[in-house]
Image (spheres, rainbow, N blue to C red):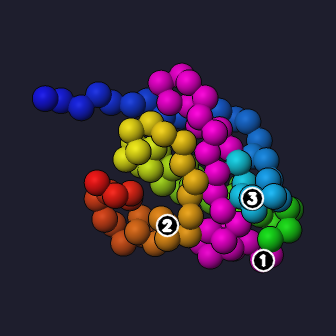
């Protein structure tokens, strides 16, 4: 049986820093339904050049890495059957290694 294909896209909404959780939140759209997603400050420091956990640095790093962040987020959403995701540093290491699935089976 063939799997249904999810349409994942990203509106032009600006990302928002969440200092309580130390993440940058952004919106994905899955089959035209908004889905709140996030990337950790650690991932932005480790993989996108954020020099600190200050809001301005994290938002700059997000902007610089937006294309790659969205690509990894799309795969993570697909792997989680459309659930919201928090992108952590290890997920980008796995994506860089070229493994098939980002999350568990």
* Residues at circles 1 and 3 in contact by the CB criterion of under 8 Å: no
Instruction: Classify residue 5 by image quadrant.
Output: top left
Q: Magenta segment: does it hold 62?
A: no
Seen from this angle, which residue lies furthest left? Answer: 1
Nearer to us: label 1 or label 3: 3
The image shows a total of numbered marks equal to 3
Alpha carbons under labels 1 and 3: distance apart = 18 Å
Residue 51: assigned label: 1
Depicted 100 relative to depicted 47: above or below: above
The residues colored magenta run 26-52
Seen from this angle, which residue lies furthest top? Answer: 32
Residue 94 image offset from top left, x and y in percent: 40, 69
Residue 100 image offset from top left, x and y in percent: 28, 59
Seen from this angle, which residue lies furthest front? Answer: 20
Residue 90 image offset from top left, x and y in percent: 49, 71
- On screen, residue 8 versus residue 22, left or right, reads left
The earlier-in-sequence mark between 3 and 2 is: 3
Q: Which residue is mark 3?
A: 21
Residue 2 image offset from top left, x and y in percent: 18, 29
- On screen, residue 10 versus residue 90, left or right, reads right
Q: Which residue is mark 2?
A: 92
């Amino acid at each position: 049986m063939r799997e249904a294909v999810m349409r994942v896209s990203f509106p032009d909404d600006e990302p928002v820093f969440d200092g309580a959780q130390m993440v940058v939140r952004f919106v994905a759209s899955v089959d035209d339904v908004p889905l709140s997603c996030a990337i950790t400050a650690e991932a932005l420091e480790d993989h996108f050049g954020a020099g600190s956990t200050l809001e301005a640095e994290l938002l700059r790093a997000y902007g610089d890495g937006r294309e790659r962040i969205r690509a990894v987020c799309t795969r993570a959403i697909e792997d989680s059957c459309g659930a919201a995701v928090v992108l952590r540093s290890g997920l980008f290491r796995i994506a860089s290694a070229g493994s098939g699935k980002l999350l568990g089976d």
